[in-house]
Amino acid sequence: MSLYQTPTKHSDSIRRPACDMCGMQMMLACIDFDIPDHEQRTFECLRCRNREFVVVKLK
Ligand SMILES: [Zn+2]
């Protein structure tokens, strides 16, 4: 069993935030599982390269 899911498969269910810098909807760049029972989603703005990290607790 693999915990890893590709961003494209996953992104359907993820609401992407708007960029703080320019307001454009950000793209899900990658998902990391550095913390047990959590996933860290990295969002990247394609316009200004601003990055945001969202840590989500998995059940
Ligand atoms: Zn931006």
Image: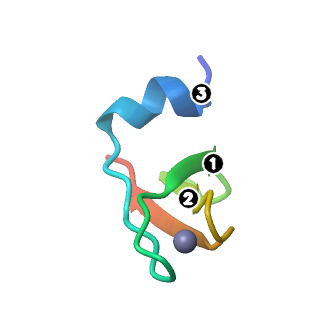
Report whether the residue tagged 3 is closer than 8 Å to ligand 1.
Answer: no
Residue 43 coordinates in the image, percent (x, y): 55, 58
Residue 46 coordinates in the image, percent (x, y): 62, 57
Q: CA distance from mark 1 to mark 3?
A: 10 Å
Of the residues shown, which amino acid type is indicated by label 1? Ala
Choose between 16 and 5: the one closer to the eye: 16
Q: Which is nearer the N-term, disc 1 or disc 2? A: 1
* Residue marked by disc 1: 29
Of the residues shown, which amino acid type is indicated by label 2? Phe
Q: Quadrant of ligand 1?
A: bottom right
Quadrant where the image shows the N terminus: top right
Left or right of residue 59, residue 28 in this image: right
Q: Which is nearer the N-term, disc 1 or disc 3? A: 3
Label 2 crowd bin: few (<14), some (14–19), many (20+), radius 10 Å: many
Mark 2 falls on what kind of element? strand
Residue at the extreme top? 1
Q: How is the image coloured?
A: rainbow
Q: CA distance from mark 3 to mark 2?
A: 14 Å
Residue 55 coordinates in the image, percent (x, y): 48, 65
Q: Which is nearer the N-term, disc 3 or disc 2? A: 3
Residue sitting at x 43%, y 35%: 11
Q: Is there a contact, CB below 8 Å, between mark 1 and mark 2?
A: yes
Task: Examine the rendered structure and indicate whether residue 28 appears above or below residue 5.
Answer: below
Of the residues shown, which amino acid type is indicated by label 3? Thr
* Residue marked by disc 3: 6
Report whether the residue tagged 1 is closer than 8 Å to ligand 1.
Answer: no
Mark 3 falls on what kind of element? loop
Residue sitting at x 48%, y 23%: 9
* Residue marked by disc 2: 43
Q: CA distance from mark 1 to mark 2?
A: 5 Å
